[in-house]
Image (cartoon, rainbow, N blue to C red):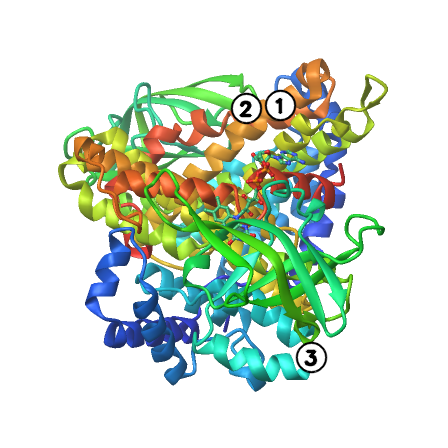
């Protein structure tokens, strides 16, 4: 055990930081600092900037555009993007579907979709949740019936983030009603321009237009768009969710928010109570960063690829600390936080506080994560 | 060189050796037996630690020590915490040992360290005073130099192992106002010094402590008296890192006991660990312990650094540890029910050690204020 800082990693961090500083438009940075998000055009341009540098999908296999970085460098890269702040690439494609396709997809699916994910030519959304299937995802009822060379899709998805921008959706549908809950589900790729699809926005309390309901009425999905084997979709979904969970620490975003709170605080720093709350959060964020470093170093050592249940700590603490940082931002904003400006990018203290409620709900709610820890780590 | 969290072969060996020697599961018997005796700790067990080489860990090779890295010291302190050790590790290896290491002259190191290592010399570190409430530089005890000799006058409070120590390192003010950073010197005072009176007692967690009154006691400057303030920071930072690691060991053990209990205690016809309300609280304890453990690593890493960055990092690490320790102490007892409160059960003694973290090293608010004075961790955000 030796824990002194590593100069090579520090140099790598500087290289990433310098690249972002030289290439990210100032307007995008300002939007993100306000708590907003890049629009579709901005995100596409930034993704292509990263792609030109070879950094759009660093965690993918090199054959598909990955960099071959070790887990520590991948972690540092993500941390720098978040804390700068620069936009993260669209996770539905780069972090969720990408790994499923290069692990389980057919050669034709890989050739067709992976390059377009890396450059954001295709905007993907995730169709897992339904009105009746949230945490108990396997109880989903959207069904796909095989007819010749196609599936006919009927049902409804809920909470689909950015479906309004999306070209494609990956989804889970029931293909065998007779099998047990998990066994009769398949993983399908659906072109959202297909006839029979209706997308309706669901407004959220922060004023944002982030999530949607998506309805399927006899939608024809070519059988070639089935990923892996029929009825085995649950396995691919579990693989995807494990990938998703380990990305949830978002330490860089908590760092960013605390940095901005400190800048905005001004005279408030003279209030010992506020100052204590701020430094206590900085310390907690550092603890999470160290925990993440431990998990990542462990991954590098054992390199099994299996997701560590300790990643549940990252999800829980990552979401809690971002929410706590947002609460501190709200406190720092003072009476001004009352102003309601209807916008769709969650760009002020109160809107951010409201919007970030989602962090402990999605990606496997924090209650579900606690149960995972109790059962798989503690053996209860 | 890259950050490596895996213990080396040598470190693993040390941990195994300590586990075998310290016998965490016998802590209750040891502690209860010690409560009947005037001296609360065992010379025999201390000698056993010396024989294992443990007392040589923190000292430089030139002084006959093993020059253990901060990481190795952390691993050792975790084991001491797990076993709720009541021997004078704190006063001799950490506080007093650190004082001799960082402030002592070559001659003093030569005279003292060999005897610490062979187990024949125990130390105490007398810094806190009535009402000083963990303010690092508040020192009212005065040191006056007359006829080439330093005379110390004042009071020292809750000095760990102050009654049984063979020599005591005393902080005293050579010049300046009561809370000035400059002007603090460290002095060696033998236990039998004229004018020194010691009133010993036991602490909640079964350590020994004493209140000292010094009346014109002759002290030998430890190194150069002008080194005082910087040396003091260093000693207290070492102590902070030790406190964090010790607490992590106690927390890990308390968590293990609690999980074991949740699996075996039956109520309503099933193990109480079947109830989700308790499962989630156990998960919270696990998260709290892991966060503190991460901060013990951070504290060890920080000890490779110098100056204010080190002190800030250690304050941050202590703050997180305190938060975790409070939660673990309260929840571990609650999840056990009544048995958790009994003297005959190990958990209570782990909890008592954890509960002394704040009284001993600073309340959470005081520690956060220290961190705030260093500018927080702004540079790392
Ligand atoms: C902003 C936002 C964006 C989203 N984006 C997407 C998306 O793009 N694609 C997608 O597929 N989904 C998306 N989701 C949906 C998200 O995955 C679900 O909200 C989540 O799975 C929880 O489901 P639910 O909302 O139905 O809550 P429920 O599952 O009904 O849970 C309600 C409450 O009960 C608790 N609970 C449930 N089961 C248990 C249990 N066994 N033990 C203890 N407590 C339990 C939950 O933790 C929660 O507190 C999004 C959600 C939000 C809020």
In this picture, is A286 found above or below A371? below
Instruction: Determine which quarter of the picture holds residue B276.
Output: top right
Q: Nearer the viewer, residue A313 or B353?
A: A313
Q: Nearer the viewer, residue A279 or A38?
A: A38
Q: Is residue B245 left or right of residue B370?
A: right
The reply to whether the C-beta atoms of the residues labelled 2 and 1 are less than 8 Å apart is yes
- Seen at 70% across and 13% down, the residue is B338
Q: Nearer the viewer, residue B145 or A270?
A: A270
Chain of the residue under label 1: B
Indicate which label's residue lies in the foreground, 1 or 3. 3
The reply to whether the C-beta atoms of the residues labelled 1 and 3 are less than 8 Å apart is no
**What separation in Å lies between label 2 and label 1 (alpha carbons)?**
6 Å
Q: Position of residue A156 (x, y in %)?
A: 59, 50
Q: Is residue B117 left or right of residue B28?
A: left
Label whose residue precedes the other's in the sequence (2 or 1): 1
**What separation in Å lies between label 1 and label 3 (alpha carbons)?**
71 Å
Chain of the residue under label 3: A
Q: What residue is shown with label 3? A: A106
- Seen at 63% across and 79% down, the residue is A109
């Amino acid at each position: 055990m030796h824990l002194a800082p590593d100069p090579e990693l520090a140099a790598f961090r500087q290289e990433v930081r310098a690249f972002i500083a030289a290439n990210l438009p100032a307007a995008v940075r300002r939007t993100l600092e306000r708590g907003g998000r890049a629009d579709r055009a901005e995100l596409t341009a930034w993704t292509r900037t990263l792609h030109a540098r070879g950094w759009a999908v660093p965690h993918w296999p090199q054959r598909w555009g990955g960099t071959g970085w070790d887990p520590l460098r991948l972690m540092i890269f993500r941390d720098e993007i978040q804390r700068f702040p620069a936009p993260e690439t669209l996770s539905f494609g780069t972090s969720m579907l990408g790994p499923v396709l290069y692990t389980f997809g057919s050669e034709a699916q890989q050739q067709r979709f992976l390059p377009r994910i890396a450059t954001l030519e295709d905007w993907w959304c995730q169709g897992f949740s339904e009105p009746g299937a949230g945490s108990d995802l396997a109880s989903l009822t959207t069904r796909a019936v095989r007819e010749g060379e196609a599936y006919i899709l009927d049902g409804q998805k809920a909470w689909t983030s950015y479906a309004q921008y999306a070209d494609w959706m990956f989804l889970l549908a029931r293909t065998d009603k007779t099998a047990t809950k998990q066994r009769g589900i398949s993983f399908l790729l659906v072109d959202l321009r297909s006839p029979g699809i209706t997308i309706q926005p669901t407004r959220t309390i922060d004023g944002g237009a982030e999530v949607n309901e998506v309805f399927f009425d006899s939608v024809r999905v070519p059988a070639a768009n089935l990923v892996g084997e029929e009825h085995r979709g649950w396995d691919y979904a579990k693989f995807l969710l494990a990938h998703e969970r380990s990305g949830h620490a978002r330490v860089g975003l908590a760092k960013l928010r605390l940095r901005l709170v400190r800048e905005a605080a001004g005279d408030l720093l003279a209030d010992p109570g506020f100052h204590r709350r701020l430094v206590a959060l900085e310390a907690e964020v550092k603890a999470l960063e160290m925990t993440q470093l431990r998990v990542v170093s462990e991954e590098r050592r054992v390199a099994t690829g299996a997701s560590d249940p300790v990643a549940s700590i990252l999800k829980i603490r990552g979401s809690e600390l971002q929410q706590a940082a947002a609460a501190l931002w709200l406190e720092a904003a003072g009476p001004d936080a009352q102003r309601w400006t209807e916008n769709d990018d969650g760009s002020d203290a109160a809107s951010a506080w409201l919007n970030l409620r989602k962090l402990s709900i999605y990606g496997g709610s924090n209650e579900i994560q606690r149960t995972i820890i109790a059962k798989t780590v503690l053996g209860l | 060189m890259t950050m490596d969290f895996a213990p080396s072969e040598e470190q693993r060996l040390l941990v195994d050796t300590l586990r075998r020697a310290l016998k965490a599961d016998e802590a209750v018997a040891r502690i209860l037996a010690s409560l009947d005796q005037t001296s609360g700790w065992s010379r025999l067990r201390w000698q056993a630690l010396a024989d294992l080489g443990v007392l040589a860990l923190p000292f430089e090779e030139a002084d006959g020590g093993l020059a253990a890295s901060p990481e190795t010291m952390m691993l050792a302190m975790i084991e001491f915490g797990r076993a709720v050790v009541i021997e004078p590790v704190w006063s001799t290896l950490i506080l007093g040992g650190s004082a001799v290491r960082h402030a002592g002259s070559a001659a003093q190191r030569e005279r003292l360290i060999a005897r610490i290592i062979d187990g024949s010399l125990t130390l105490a570190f007398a810094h806190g005073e009535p009402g000083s409430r963990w303010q690092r530089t508040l020192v009212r005890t005065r040191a006056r130099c007359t006829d080439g000799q330093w005379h110390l006058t004042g009071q020292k409070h809750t000095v760990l192992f102050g009654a049984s120590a063979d020599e005591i390192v005393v902080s005293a003010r050579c010049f300046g106002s009561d809370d000035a950073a400059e002007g603090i010197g460290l002095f060696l005072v033998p236990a039998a010094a004229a004018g020194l009176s010691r009133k010993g007692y036991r602490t909640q967690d079964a350590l020994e402590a004493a209140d000292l009154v010094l009346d014109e006691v002759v002290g030998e400057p430890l190194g150069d008296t002008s080194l005082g303030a910087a040396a003091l920071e260093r000693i207290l930072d070492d102590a902070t890192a030790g406190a964090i690691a010790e607490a992590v060991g106690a927390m890990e053990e308390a968590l293990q006991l609690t999980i074991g209990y949740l699996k075996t205690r039956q109520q309503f016809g099933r193990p109480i660990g079947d109830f989700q309300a308790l499962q989630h609280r156990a998960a919270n304890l696990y998260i709290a312990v892991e966060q503190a453990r991460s901060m013990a690593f951070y504290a060890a890493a920080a000890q490779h650094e110098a100056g204010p960055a080190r002190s800030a990092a250690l304050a941050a690490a202590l703050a997180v540890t305190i938060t975790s320790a409070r939660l673990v102490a309260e929840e571990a007892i609650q999840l056990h029910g009544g048995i958790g409160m009994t003297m005959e059960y190990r958990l209570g003694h782990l909890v008592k050690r954890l509960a002394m973290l704040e009284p001993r090293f600073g309340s959470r608010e005081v520690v956060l204020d220290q961190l705030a004075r260093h500018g927080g961790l702004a540079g790392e955000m």
